[in-house]
């Protein structure tokens, strides 16, 4: 499917399990049990935002080098356009995380 090999399909499935069991579990633990004390909201925000960020990189890479099926947008993972894409994604991640942490420290996130 979408040009994935059997290994690629298995890798994707394992990655989805790892997301649920690893980084999202840390965020949920921080949210539900306050295991990190006063830093629990910060750990939760960083965990969830990092999960999204680290999955956008392979998402963009795989999508742009495989789709459309007959004529992918970029020829390979080494295409120079990816440096710009990754830079923009990193900038958006840093800005988004900064805004979340600022909002949490401002007291708006302490309602519950």
Image (cartoon, helix red, strand yellow):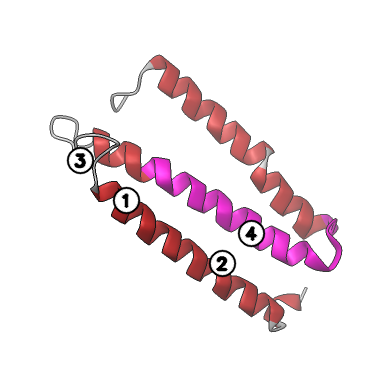
Q: For the point 30% across and 36% down, which residue is it? A: 77
Would you say the residues marked 2 and 4 are in contact, meaning their CB atoms lie under 8 Å apart?
yes
Circle 4 — which element?
Answer: helix
Q: Is residue 112 above or below residue 40?
A: below
| Numbered label tally | 4
Q: Which class describes the residues within 10 Å of circle 1: few (<14), some (14-19), or many (20+)? A: few
Q: Is residue 72 above or below residue 6?
A: below
**Residue assigned mark 2:** 97
Query: Seen from this angle, which residue lies furthest top?
Result: 6
Q: Nearer the viewer, residue 28 or 77?
A: 77
On the rendered structure, is 80 left or right of 99?
Answer: left
**Residue assigned mark 4:** 46
In the image, which disc is placed on residue 74?
3
Q: Nearer the viewer, residue 69 or 92?
A: 92
Q: Decide whether residue 58 is among the magenta residues.
A: yes
**Residue assigned mark 1:** 83
């Amino acid at each position: 499917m979408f040009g994935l090999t059997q290994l690629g399909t298995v890798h994707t499935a394992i990655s989805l399990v790892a997301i649920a069991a690893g980084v999202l579990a840390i965020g949920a633990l921080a949210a539900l049990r306050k295991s990190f004390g006063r830093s629990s909201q910060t750990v939760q925000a960083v965990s969830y935002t990092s999960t999204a960020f680290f999955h956008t990189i392979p998402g963009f890479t795989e999508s742009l080098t495989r789709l459309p099926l007959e004529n992918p947008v970029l020829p390979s993972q080494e295409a120079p356009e990816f440096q710009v894409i990754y830079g923009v994604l990193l900038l958006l991640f840093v800005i988004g995380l900064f805004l979340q942490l600022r909002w949490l420290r401002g007291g708006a996130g302490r309602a519950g």
